[in-house]
Image (spheres, rainbow, N blue to C red):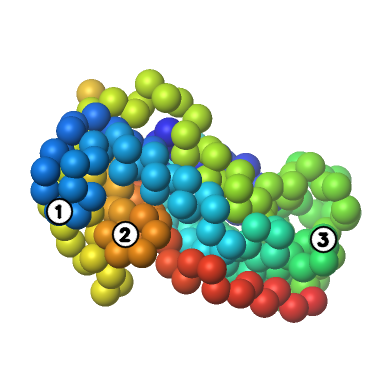
Amino acid sequence: MRTIKMATAVATASVSVALLAGCGDSGGGSEPFEGQSADDIAAKAVEATKQADSLHMKGDVRPENGGTVTLDVSVDQEKNCEGTIGTGEARADVRHADATLYLRGDEQYWRDALRQQPDAAQGMAQKLDGKWVKMPAGDAATAGVCDKQGFIAAMDEDESERQGMKRDGTTEVDGEEALKLTKKTSAGETLALYVATEGEPYILKSTTEGGKNPGSVTFSDYNEPVRAEQ
């Protein structure tokens, strides 16, 4: 539930994003979501986010293999996407349109991506710096780059982590009111899920504080067109 695995060549890493599919605590009787448990609210938030036509994700996380991964990507149900993903000092722009994926990485990105290739291929890193590259169709390494539904489905991988969420009042995320749900884990982490209180109960933000893999990701621009031009 807490981890989204975006193992893609774009970031050349397994990207772990702390996202909750929450629960526990009855939280009864208080606005917003009066009479609904944290479990019900979180479940509705995950479903609403899954059903959204598109969204924008932005944040940074620390995957289990170390380093810091950043993402700033818009993606829709049709797997159109546009944005930037990076790890460490490497960055790559990503663009997916008409079932075709394009990458524009810096030299460090290509050095990392080609590390396991023959010397001749590794020598291409400098030449590829800043250039758009059309990726092969069906390339397993980049198959999940723009899979919105895969991102959301990964939030609910482990149902055992759904227990113990509690209401923690309301706050604002980028000007929108949100109900905050929190949970402390045995590993010393504090997990938080922020759910929109007006309109659809979309996920607005997810954070992990403390522990080995802190991170924060915001979700915005729900249902906005993703114009990924070739």
Q: Describe the element under mark 3 as helix, strand or loop.
A: loop
Q: Which quadrant is home to the N terminus?
A: top left
Could you tell me residue 159's position as x and y percent? 42, 25
Q: Is residue 154 above or below residue 57?
A: above
Mark 3 burial class by Cα count in 10 Å: few <14, some 14-19, many 20+: few
Query: SS for tag 1?
Result: loop
**Residue marked by disc 3:** 99
Identify the residue under disc 2: 196
Instruction: Please tell me which residue is depicted at 16% across the width and 57% down the height of the picture.
Output: 170
Going from the N terminus, do you reach mark 1 or mark 3 first?
1
Disc 1/disc 3 C-alpha distance (Å) = 44 Å
| Quarter residue 165 falls in | top left
Q: Residue at x 24, y 29 (%)?
A: 24
Type of the residue with mark 2 = Ala
Pointer 1 and pointer 2: residues touching (CB < 8 Å)? no
Q: CA distance from mark 1 to mark 2?
A: 12 Å
Q: Position of residue 133 (x, y in %)?
A: 81, 67
Image quadrant for the C terminus? bottom right
Figure quadrant of residue 217:
bottom left
Q: Is residue 94 visible from the viewing direction of this image?
A: no
Q: Is residue 29 left or right of residue 14?
A: left
Q: Amino acid at mark 3?
A: Ala
Residue 49 at least partly seen: yes
What label sits on residue 31 in the rendered view? 1
Residue 216 x/y as whole percent: 35, 54
Chain-order first, disc 1 or disc 2: 1
| Residue 181 horizontal side relative to residue 148, left or right | left
Question: Which x, y percent locates residue 63?
Answer: 46, 41
